[in-house]
Amino acid sequence: MRPSTGHIMFHKTKILLLFTSLSLSNLIFCAQIALPYPYGLSEGHEETPINDFFKVAVFGDSLLHNFHVSNKVSMLAQMNAIADPEFIRNGLIDLDPSSESVNSFSEQLSKATLAAGVPALTINLGTPGSNVVNDPEHDKAQNKEDWISGIVSLKAQVDRLAELSIDETPFTPDLVISWLGHNDINLLFRGYEGSDLERSFAEVYRKELTRALKVLKKASDQDLKKRALIVFTIGNLESALKARDLCELEHIEDPKKYPEYEKAQDSIGSLQKTNRAPALAIAKRLNDVIRNTVSEIQSNPLFQNENLKIYVSEAFANMVYKKSDLSLKDAFHPSPSGFQKMADVFLKESKDARKFINPFVQN
């Protein structure tokens, strides 16, 4: 159950905007956009007023979901399951209390905050396929069927953050976490020049992070509560690809292992070995953009506020991945082991921000 006093849903008006075309790929995201936001909250607090929670919202992509590359029908089924409590099993939110399941960030956060008498609410605003760069005109010029530009993007996720503060029962998260950029690497293999991609990424990233911080600042100016934003740099692609190479050896020997291996490689440009060097190079450059953008925003007088703070973390960029951390389906998205690493990183790297917001919920 979600909190009875909170309306954690996509705005229905957005659904109408999607029915401009009715191909199967469009219907996949039409189905998803109507679902509630995936969320996790402290057990037994379903009736607790929404503003009594320690509230965390997360921007991200498919790495925040129990998702893998497959055929369109299968991905449609996965997306329909994203907000279903029976299927919310990933590093961010896992509602399965059994010891065999992932001890998710949501579960660990609830334990930490409840020790201080404060329930926790974690909301996943991320969408599989999300980019930072949002350029429908470029996609059109490249004859791409990427109608989803603008819907699965950082911009759309910041829109959702803003909508939370003007909904039927308005609230603004105490902490926002952003982990995006992985899908932008693949734009390099879809007609973007490296310099153009880097420039577009920088422009959009700066604009949307600034917009997200303005949402937090407006709320803090009104209620005088502390809020924070944590930005993670792009994950360690080189390590993940090395782990994937080990999966490939098993797949070659037995094609039943990692059955979606080829589908992932065909659809994700950075997984193709001929693209490896430029993919790693652009990932490094985009991470430099993320660091520089955060540094610029931190020095902006508008956000030099005693109630607002922004952090940057390199934890995922420095993570070493093992074969066991990758999905048994496509050998790219996280396995339960990979999700557990993700959950532990989110908890550890959010400690300083949680201490800043509320010293009692830092553990």
Image: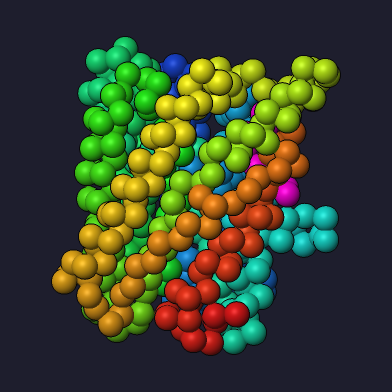
Give yes or no for residue 335 being in the magenta stretch. Answer: yes
**Which SS type dominates the magenta stretch?**
loop
Q: List x then y, in percent, for residue 203.
A: 22, 44
Q: List x then y, in percent, for residue 69.
A: 60, 28
Q: What quarter of the picture does the C terminus occupy?
A: bottom right
Residue at 55% x, 47% y: name it.
Answer: 64
Give the answer, above or below, for where 99 lies relative to 47. Answer: above
Q: List x then y, in percent, for residue 189.
A: 40, 21
Residue 93 lies in what quarter of the image?
bottom right
Q: What quarter of the picture does the N terminus occupy?
A: bottom right
Q: Which residues are magenta?
A: 330-337
Is any atom of residue 206 visible in this view? yes
Give the answer, above or below, for where 186 lies relative to 7. Answer: above
Residue at 64% x, 34% y: name it.
Answer: 242
Q: List x then y, in percent, for residue 139.
A: 30, 21
Give yes or no for residue 262 being in the magenta stretch. Answer: no
Residue 241 vs residue 6, the one in the foreground:
241
